[in-house]
Each structure stands twice: as structure tokens, then as C-alpha cells.
Amino acid sequence: MSRESVLSSLIQFDVPVAQLKAELGTLTWDCAPVVTLLRSHIAAVLDRYSRGEIDAPTVEDWANLVECREDIGFEAGFEELIDAAIFDLANPILNGELSAVAPVILARLR
């Protein structure tokens, strides 16, 4: 898969985490953004969590795959909000359990 297609699958979270990890492992880190993470992408992941389709560790794994990637840009005008949301989701030990932080993050994103 191309970098763009792998990263698109990551931000849309339309393939399992294990597959994403494997495909991301083939990509180099130092690359300009080729996809843009939107507030709606994060909200969609949290909505899936709220519906019980994915669990908290899966959301954490997804956020860890997104966090600090130079090849993923953030929605213009919302960069700090998106960065903070990904940090919160990737670090539940620091920021609290997903069941507590998900509603707060969703409210900020919407």
C-alpha cells in the first residue's frame, strides 16, 4: 500500500490496529503531511467506542499510532485541539480512563 493509503486507513480507522501497525512499520518517519486528521475522524473513533464496537485499549493503540507522526497533518484552525485530544487518548495513565475523558473530548471536538 502507498503511504497515503496506509495513513488514510489509519485516520479513518477502517482496518484493525495490528494491520495498521504492520503497514506503518514499513514507512519512514520523516515525511511531510500527506493526509489530514479531522475532528470528525477522532469523533468517529470515540463514537465507535461509545457504541461498544471497540474497547479502550484499542482506542489507546490507535491514538498511539497517530501521535507524533509528521506525515499526518491536523485540520486547519484546530491543530492544538486535535493534538491535545490525541495526547489524551494515547495516554490514559496520565489523563484518565477513556470512559471519563471521551465525553469531554467529544464535546470539545463538536
Image (spheres, helix red, strand yellow):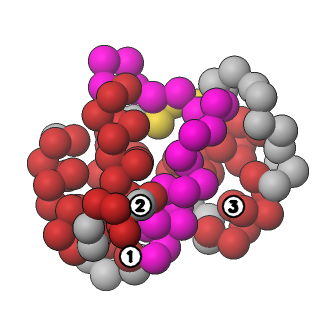
Q: Which residue is mark 2?
A: 91
Label 3 residue SS: helix
In the shown orientation, is residue 38 left or right of residue 61?
left
Q: Secondary structure at mark 1?
A: helix
**Contact flag, marks 3 and 1 (Cβ < 8 Å):** no
Residue hosting label 1: 56
Residue 6 percent location from the top left of the image: 71, 47
Q: Which residue is mark 3?
A: 20
* Cα distance between the residues tagged 2 and 1: 11 Å
Q: Residue at x 38, y 76 (%)?
A: 56
Q: Which residues are drawn in magenta?
A: 57-78
Which disc number belongs to residue 21?
A: none
Between circles 2 and 1, the one closer to the viewer is 2
N-term mark: 3 or 1: 3
Occupied quadrant, residue 49: bottom left
For the point 49% across and 73% down, which residue is it? 58
What residue type is disc 1 on? Ala
Image position of 69 with respect to 104: above or below: above
Crowdedness of circle 1 by 10 Å Cα count: few (<14), some, many (20+)?
A: some
In the foreground, 50 or 101 = 101
Query: In x, y percent, where is residue 57?
Result: 46, 76
The answer to whether residue 45 of the structure is visible from this angle is: no
Cα–Cα span, label 3 and label 1: 17 Å
